[in-house]
Image (cartoon, rainbow, N blue to C red):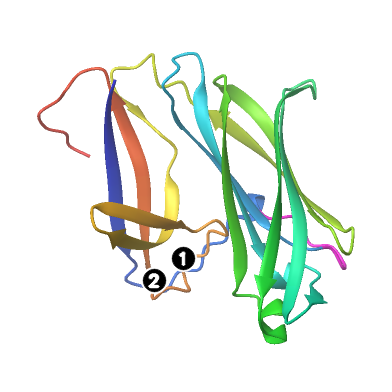
Amino acid sequence: MKKIFFLLHIALISFALAQVESRKPAAAVDIPEFYMDALSFASSDSLTSRVDLYAHVPYDALQFVKSDNQYVAKYEVTFNFLTDDNASVSEKAWSEEVRVQQFDQTLSKHAYSLTERSVAISPGIYTLRAQMRDNESKKISTVVKKIIVGNYSTSNLALSDILLVTKVTTEGEKRNLVPNIPGNVGENNNVFYLFFELYSPQKPDSLEL
């Protein structure tokens, strides 16, 4: 299958502030807030698709503890794919540790920990339940959203999910993308990028998008 990568640069003429509400937990008192997203892409296996899972945890949602000359926070993230009858078909969990030098950094709403993992899963519609647990405070925050995992092997032309990107940097021929998981496009001079992939079993010499 031919894979084509696209990265579109978007500049907003007027100010826009777009927050995708399903990416964050509902407002609650004294509950740590985090953001999540899940995007599906084609995989090398025609029976499954690849889903990239993102967790964006602001530092002020974590409980830091002083350790020597640093401040340390630890948290756990769990993503669970559920069917309509609430049966779990796939789960991905991981632990993270954050270290900062200054106490002021622990209170920052702009500094954050961004992590990514990938899972292979059959195409379909799922309820995705994401949890973030702070190890020190033991507090848990949950986000639930419906997702569609696309089937990219049955069409002459297929489009992956679209990743919102805040920043693009290059190192030689390698291009690095900084995902915008909160979905806020009004904080970076109204400029952002869209990354996605197109798939085709053929090799077209031109494409109008």
Which residue is pictured at 16% across the width and 23% down the height? 203
Which residue is pictured at 31% across the width and 54% down the height? 175
Mark 1 element type: loop
> Is residue 143 in view from this perspective?
no
Residue beneath disc 1: 185
Q: Nearer the viewer, residue 149 or 76?
A: 76
Residue 4 placement (x, y as % from top left): 26, 35
- Of labels 1 and 2, earlier in sequence is 1
Count of marks overlaid on the render: 2
Q: Is residue 7 left or right of residue 60?
A: left
Q: Toward which corner of the image does residue 11 lie, by quadrant?
A: bottom left
Mark 2 element type: loop
Q: Amino acid at mark 2?
A: Asn
Residue beneath disc 2: 190
Q: CA distance from mark 1 to mark 2?
A: 6 Å
For label 2, count other residues whose C-alpha is less than 10 Å away and answer few (under 14), some (14-19) or many (20+).
some
From the image, give the main secondary structure of the stretch colored magenta: loop
Q: Is residue 77 left or right of residue 200?
A: right
The span shown in magenta is: 24-31
Assess whether mark 2 and mark 1 are in contact (beta carbons under 8 angstroms).
yes
